[in-house]
Structure formats: C-alpha cells, structure tokens
C-alpha cells in the first residue's frame, strides 16, 4: 500500500492581525519528497483532499511552533524554529505605511514562513502530528492567544527565559559525557561565525544600495554635462555614458535584492536553527539540574535519617523515613533518572540525525542557495558587459 | 613625524612590523623609478600634445620625504638658449606654483590659456590611515594587518604616482606651447641648478590670492552688467556662454564621480573583506563537506574584492581625473575670456575718456595714446583667443574688434582647448569602456569557475 501523493500544492493565505489591515500573502508549500512514504497504521490517506488552502494568522504559526516544541523538543527532535515576532515591523505595517520597508518586511515574513513550513513537513514524525495536520487542514483554528508578544503569557515566557539564563550561569555541569561538551562548544563557535558572516552580508547590502544612489546622481550629472557639451559626437557619447550609469544603478539595486534574499536570509535561518539546537542542550541541562537537586535532597534526607538513628529517636526516625519516602520516592528518582536516560538516548539519536541533517538537508540547502546567489552575480556581470559593449562604439565615434 | 618607506619594485617597510608597536619607518624616502615612461603618464591629459623634439621635459624621479616631495625635472633640448643639451634639476611643488603664477601675471601671455597648476601633493589621508594602522588595533589578526598594510601602501603609491604625473603634464604643456616655451622664467625653472628660493605663499599672500579671485569674479559680474558694454563678436559671446555652463556642469560631474568612486571603494569592494574572513573561519572549523565549499567561497570573495578594487582605480583614473583636469582647464579658458572682457571694458572706458578729453580739448594726446594701447591689447587678446598668433605690438591703426572670418595662423587658444578636450575625452572614454569590459569578463570567469567546482562536489 502506498500513500497517495499528499500534497501537490498546499496554498495558505495569511491574514495579519487586528486593526482591520489585511495583507493577503500566498505561500506555496510543495512537498514532492513525500511520495512513497508508507504509513503502516492507517489505510486512509492522511489528508482528506489533495489540494487545499487555509487562512492563517502569524500568531497561528507561532502557536503551532510552541505546541510542537513542547511535544517534541524534550524527546530530542529538532523542531524547526519559527520566524520571530517583530514589533517594529508589525507596527509599521499596521500603521499602513506604504513605503518599501514595510512591503519588504511583509515579503521577508512571507518567505520565512514558507521556509518554516517546508522544514516542518520534511520531518516524518512532525508530519504525522495531529496539531500540524489540524493547522494545515481545518478551516477554523482556535486562536492561539498566548503568543502575543506583549501578553501575560508572553511576558511570563520572557521571565522564564531570563531565569533560565541565570540558571545556566550558576550551575556548573559536571559533564561526564565529553561528547556533549564538545558538541556544545562546536555549536557555540558555529553560531558566532554565522552571526559574523550574516552581519557582513547585511553590510554589503547597505553598501550596494549606497553605491546605487550615488551612481544615479552621477548619471544625472553626466547627462547635464553632455547637454552643455557643444561638440555633437562627444555630447552624444556623454549622454550614452549617463544612460549606462543609470542602468548600472538599477543593476546594483537588483543585486542588493538578491544579496539579501538569497544569502542573508539563508544565514538567518541557520542561525535560528542553531538556536533551536542550543535549546535542546539547555533542556538537557535543566533536566540534569533537577536530577542533581533531587540527589542532594535525597542525600540530606538520608543524613537526617542517619542522625536520627544515632540519636535513637524512634519516632523521629520514622518521621525521617516517611519524609524520605515522601520527598524523594524511588519512583520519583527513577523518573528523573529515566528522563535523563531518555534525554541521553535522544541526544545520541540526535547525533545521528544531526549527521543526517548536515549531510543532506543542510549541505544541499546551503549549496543550492549559494549556487543561485553566485549565478545572480554572474548575471550582473553579464549585464555590465552588455552595457559597456553597447557604449564602446559611441565612444569610438567621437571625432 | 612620519615617513613611509616604499619602493615601486620592492614594497618593504622598515623591518617587519609587530602589530602592537606599529609601523616604524622614519625618513626613508619613497622613490618612483621611471622605468617605463609611458606607463606613468596620465593618459587622460597627455593625449596629442603637439610635439616637436626640440624641447623634451619629463620628471624622471621623485622622492617623498616627510611632508615634501622633490621632483627631478629632466630636460633634453637642442634649443640655443640652453647651455647644455641635457640637464636636470630638483624642484618642489612651491616652485611649480611660482612658475604658474609668473605666467598668469605676465601681461604678454594674457591672450593665452595658461595650463592649470598641478594640485598640491596630498598624502594626509593616506598617512593618517597608515598611522592609525600602526598604532595597533589588537582585534586585528596578523594576516589581516599585513593585508591592510599592503593595501594602504599601494594606495599611497598610487597617490604618489598621480601627483608626479600631474606635475609632469603641466611642464609638458608648457614645453609644447610655441609661445610659452620661450619664456625666460620657464628656462630658469628648467635649468637653474640651485634652489629657486621660492617659499610657499604665507598666509597673507594666500589670503591676497583668495581676495583677488573674489574681486575678479565681482569684476566680471560688473563688466557684463555694464550697460554700455556689448559683446561685439558672436564667437566670443557663444564661447562665453558655453564655457560658463560647461564649467559648472563639469565641476558637478567631477564631484559626483568622486563620490561614486569613494562609495565603490570603501563600500562595495571593502565589503567583500569581512565576508571573506568570516567564510574562512567557518571553513577552517567545519569538519565536513561544507568545509571545502566555505574555503572556496572565501577565496572567491577575496578575488572579487581585488577585481572590484581594480575597477575602482581604473574608473578613478579614466573618468574622475579626466573630469577634474578639464574642470581646471575650462577654468583657465574662462580666465582668458575674462581678461579679454576686461580689456574690452578698458577699451570702452578709454574711448569715453578720449571723447571727454576731445570735448574739453585737454590732454587729448594722452587720452589718445591710452586709447590706442587699450585697443591694441584688446585686439591682441581677441586674436590670440580666436585665431592664434598675437599681432605684433604697434599695429598701425586701431580698428573695431570684429575681425572678418577666421584667419588661421597658428593654433588659436580656444580651438586648441576644444580639440584637446575632445581627443582626451575620446581616448579616456574608450579606455574606460575597454577596462570595464575586461574586468567584467574576468569576474564572470572567476564566478563561473567557482560555480563549476561547487556544482561538481557531491
């Protein structure tokens, strides 16, 4: 039994929040690699239709992500990160500014959401998740309220994050497993390097835009000069030069666009991915801390019990024993142990997955985008050649 | 005080700099050896200078010491008024300026376009940058430091070569001009072995010069506004309108071109640097297939940067310098027109004075001779500007300035200006286009090669 092709195309329209401003964005999510996956459990096709579209708010995406994260993160799966909320960006959009930066922002967001969905559905486990299916299929979704950036839940989450950071600073993990430590360090380094690269690519985009503006100004100036030149052939050549410069200015603008959408965005994605991975490590740390704490408490209780034994206060002994049993039951400790075991196992599994990820998706993804980017650079150079070749005879015609 | 040691053939600084202690080199001289003379000449200006080999001037050597540049001016000539056929002297920038001013202030040459003076050698920006580099930025790695130092040194050298070229072109134009080359001061400049003892203008003189310029432009405005003064010659009317507008436009174009070059250099070209560095460090860390890709990309961006730098410097030479030179030259042409206009105004005034004297019948003689002088001067300037060789002084009768037709005697100054301009622009625009094409093709090849490698890897 083979599952049918699950999606041909699944289109989604996103409706941005409140204030009556509606921005319709279409995302195409195509998933050809799903063909041939066999689902042993059901004989039904997983989805009722082969092509469908739903409207989703940005907060719905965040809600989906937090659900998936809470379910799968602690089991060791890398849940693809969702795009960030941007208060500044959204405010601009809400206020209705029609300038290029707000359309850029909307476009940025659309592309990021598309990539997010594509990553998520690539995961065989995540694909089978009922929440995800509900997200993709059902026409009405319960509103995910606690994803609002400034909501109470949002603030609570921020506080938790801060507490986590403090926690990390104070506890010192005795890493019995050197592998984890090494991997963690590697991720730290990778994160730093990617951030540096990302910053420099963004700077390049800025520089190109600046250059484009100045080239436009020069083009105008050259045209004026051509006008005032009284030798006809030279005048014409100067006007042609002005035209060439104007076209070059356009070229720079387009290239800046490509710089950004291909190269820079790719890097942002990977930086966020690394952050998700770090999340897994952090979770592991927290688990370990809980286990440690439980250990310490148990130890203290045993000490108390021992003291009681020495002091020979039978009733107190009984009390202590009860406390031990209460506070730290065997099953409780077992549970913490078990969690640690699960985490260890899943992180080992993650190691394999990580190698997978690196070999397949990451390499292919990165390379594909880089190749596209380089090809855009080649295009620019080809255009430059065209323009200057057209200009050369004009210059030679000056007599 | 700070000096830089560089040689064109062998770029070494004094010792290997430890990047904490900074660059040490004091008093070492920079030399620009003129191996290939054609290479150093700024092609934008030296185009078609009428040459006869009776007077050949070049700057064969130059030394940069502290804040002075010393040029070695070499002359080869078979002209009789020189003592030898080959000789050379050492001159500094101030002496060039002195020579230029001597020409400008000389009444005999009022009808000629005086070649614009070379700009002062300005290494300030470059020196500051090198000094900052020397003071040491501890976050810069050793390789980055070496790279930056090399680039700054190359920049310093480029500025140096340019200033040598500018000074040389000034002298060569003088040598090529049939009238100017015979000037006594020029011979002294070329021949006199000792220091000309020309000090740079002190502040008072600079101020004086500045004020004179203001007075000149005010005067010009006044003259043209004068009700009685009518330009009687259409040719000059046309030239004046043309030159005024042209000068403004070319000034603006020069400014814009400079800005483009600035942003291209510091923004785009340099922007590839941190990308390359970051890719490199990513490449050295990665332990899988992406490693080679990262390193290849790092190399690609490094080479792209070098290509872009070359594009920028070519644009600078062919476009920016061209515009700048003709901005100055058009100013010199404007000056000529101003002098002529001034002469016309004087002539008109003299006419009025003569009339007044005649009616009063007093000092008629002096008024007459004055008027004649003015007339002659005016004619001389007009002829020289329009037609060429000035009339010999003491022409018999004074006539109205309109001259029928255009009797071509020798190169008329304004025509000369035009033809120089046209051929320079032609040459430089062609070279600019060819160089842009060359670099774009090189970039394409580089990118394509990298793409082949990246696609080829599994």
Image (cartoon, rainbow, N blue to C red):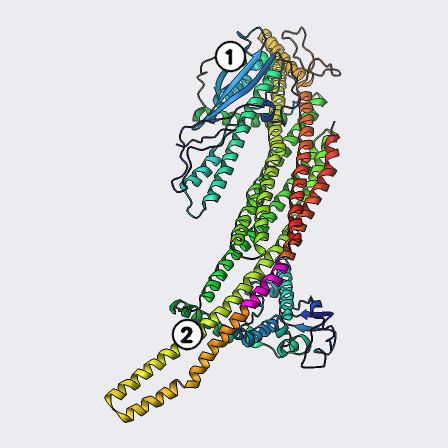
Q: What is the secondary structure assignment of the residue under circle 2?
A: helix
Of residues B320 and A278, the one drawn nearer to the viewer in this rendering: A278
User: Residue A221 appears at what percent x and percent y?
Assistant: 65, 38
Q: Quadrant of residue B168?
A: top right
Proximity of marks 2 and 1: CB atoms separated by less than 8 Å: no
Q: Is residue B245 visible?
A: yes
User: Residue A134 appears at what percent x and percent y?
Assistant: 65, 78
- The chain to which mark 2 is attached is A
Q: Residue furthest left?
A: A311
Residue depicted at x 69% and y 23%:
B419
Q: Residue furthest bottom?
A: A315
Of residues B349 and B126, the one drawn nearer to the viewer in this rendering: B126
The answer to whether residue B452 is above or below residue B414 is below
- What's the mark number on residue A80? none
Other-residue count near label 2 (Cα within 10 Å), few / some / many at <14 / 14–19 / ≥20: some
Residue A358: within the magenta? yes
**Quadrant showing the N terminus of chain A:** bottom right
Residue assigned mark 1? B191
Q: What is the secondary structure assignment of the residue under circle 1?
A: helix
Report the predominant secondary structure element of the magenta stretch.
helix
The answer to whether residue B90 is above or below residue B252 is above
Of residues A209 and B226, the one drawn nearer to the viewer in this rendering: A209
User: Residue B431 appears at what percent x and percent y?
Assistant: 67, 32
**Quadrant showing the C terminus of chain A:** top right
Q: How many marks?
A: 2
Residue assigned mark 2? A289
User: Residue B241 appears at what percent x and percent y?
Assistant: 67, 28
Q: Quadrant of residue A135?
A: bottom right
Residue B384: within the magenta? no
Q: State which mark lies toward you, 2 or 1.
A: 2
Looking at the rendering, the stretch of residues picked out in magenta corresponds to A351-366
């Amino acid at each position: 039994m083979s599952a049918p092709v699950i999606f041909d195309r699944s289109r989604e329209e996103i409706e941005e929040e409140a204030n009556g401003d509606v921005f319709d964005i279409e995302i195409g999510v195509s998933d050809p690699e799903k063909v041939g996956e066999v689902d042993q459990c059901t004989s039904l096709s997983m989805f009722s239709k082969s092509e469908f579209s739903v409207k989703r708010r940005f907060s719905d995406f965040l809600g989906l992500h937090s659900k998936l994260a809470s379910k799968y993160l602690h089991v060791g799966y890398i849940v693809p990160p969702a795009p960030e909320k941007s208060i500044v960006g959204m405010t601009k959009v809400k206020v209705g500014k029609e300038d290029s930066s707000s359309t850029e922002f909307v476009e940025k967001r659309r592309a990021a959401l598309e990539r997010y969905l594509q990553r998520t559905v690539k995961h065989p486990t995540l694909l089978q998740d009922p929440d995800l299916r509900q997200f993709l299929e059902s026409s009405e979704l319960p509103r995910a309220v606690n994803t609002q950036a400034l909501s109470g839940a949002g603030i609570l989450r921020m506080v938790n994050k801060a507490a986590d950071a403090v926690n990390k600073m104070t506890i010192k993990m005795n890493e019995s497993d050197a592998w984890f430590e090494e991997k963690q360090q590697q991720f730290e380094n990778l994160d730093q390097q990617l951030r540096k690269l990302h910053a420099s690519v963004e700077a390049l985009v800025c520089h190109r835009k600046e250059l484009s503006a100045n080239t436009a100004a020069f083009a105008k100036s050259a045209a004026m000069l051509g006008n005032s030149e009284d030798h006809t052939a030279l005048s014409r050549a100067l006007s042609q030069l002005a035209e060439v410069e104007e076209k070059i200015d356009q070229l720079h603008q387009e290239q800046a666009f490509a710089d950004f959408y291909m190269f820079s965005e790719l890097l942002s994605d990977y930086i966020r991915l690394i952050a998700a991975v770090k999340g897994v490590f952090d979770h592991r740390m927290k688990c370990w801390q809980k286990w440690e704490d439980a250990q310490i408490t148990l130890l203290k209780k045993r000490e108390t019990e021992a003291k009681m034994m020495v002091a020979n206060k039978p009733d107190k002994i009984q009390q202590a024993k009860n406390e031990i049993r209460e506070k730290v039951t065997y099953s409780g400790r077992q549970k913490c142990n078990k969690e640690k075991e699960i985490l260890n196992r899943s992180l080992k599994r993650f190691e394999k997955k990580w190698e997978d990820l690196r070999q397949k998706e990451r390499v292919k993804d990165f390379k594909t985008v880089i190749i596209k980017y380089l090809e855009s650079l080649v295009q620019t150079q080809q255009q430059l050649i065209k323009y200057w070749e057209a200009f050369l005879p004009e210059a030679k015609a000056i007599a | 005080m700070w000096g830089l040691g560089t040689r064109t053939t062998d770029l070494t600084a004094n010792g290997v700099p430890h990047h904490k202690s900074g660059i040490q080199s004091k008093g070492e001289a920079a030399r620009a050896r003129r191996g290939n003379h054609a290479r150093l000449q700024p092609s934008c200006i030296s185009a078609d200078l009428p040459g006869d080999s009776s007077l050949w001037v070049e700057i064969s050597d130059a030394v940069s010491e502290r804040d002075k540049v010393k040029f070695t001016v070499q002359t080869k000539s078979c002209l009789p008024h020189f003592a030898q056929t080959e000789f050379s002297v050492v001159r500094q920038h101030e002496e060039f300026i002195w020579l230029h001013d001597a020409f400008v202030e000389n009444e005999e040459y009022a009808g000629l376009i005086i070649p614009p003076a070379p700009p002062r050698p300005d290494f300030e920006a470059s020196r500051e940058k090198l000094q900052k580099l020397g003071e040491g930025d501890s976050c810069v790695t050793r390789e980055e430091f070496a790279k930056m130092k090399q680039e700054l040194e190359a920049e310093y050298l480029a500025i140096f070569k340019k200033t040598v070229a500018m000074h040389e072109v000034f002298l060569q134009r003088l040598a090529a001009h049939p009238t100017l080359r015979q000037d006594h001061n020029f011979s002294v400049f070329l021949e006199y072995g000792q220091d000309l003892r020309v000090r740079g203008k002190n502040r008072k003189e600079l101020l004086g010069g500045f004020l004179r310029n203001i007075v000149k432009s005010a005067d010009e405005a006044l003259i043209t506004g004068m009700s009685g003064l009518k330009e009687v010659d259409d040719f000059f009317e046309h030239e004046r309108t043309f030159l005024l507008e042209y000068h403004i436009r070319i000034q603006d174009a020069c400014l814009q071109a400079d800005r483009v070059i600035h942003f291209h250099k510091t923004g785009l070209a340099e922007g590839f640097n941190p990308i390359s560095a970051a890719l490199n460090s990513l490449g050295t860390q990665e332990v899988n297939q992406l490693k080679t890709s990262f390193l290849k990309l790092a190399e690609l961006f490094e080479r792209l940067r070098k290509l872009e730098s070359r594009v920028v410097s070519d644009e600078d030479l062919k476009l920016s310098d061209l515009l700048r030179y003709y901005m100055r030259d058009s100013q010199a042409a404007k000056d000529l027109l101003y002098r002529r206009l001034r002469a016309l105004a004087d002539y008109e005034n003299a006419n009025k004075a003569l009339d007044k004297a005649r009616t009063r019948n007093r000092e008629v003689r002096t008024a007459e001779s004055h008027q004649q002088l003015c007339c002659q001067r005016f004619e001389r300037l007009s002829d020289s500007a329009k037609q060429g060789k000035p009339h010999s002084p003491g022409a018999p009768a004074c006539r109205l300035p309109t001259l029928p037709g255009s009797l071509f005697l020798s190169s008329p100054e304004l025509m000369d200006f035009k033809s120089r301009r046209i051929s320079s622009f032609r040459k430089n625009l062609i070279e600019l286009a060819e160089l842009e094409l060359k670099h774009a093709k090189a970039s394409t090849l580089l990118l394509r090669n990298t793409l082949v490698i990246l696609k080829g890897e599994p």
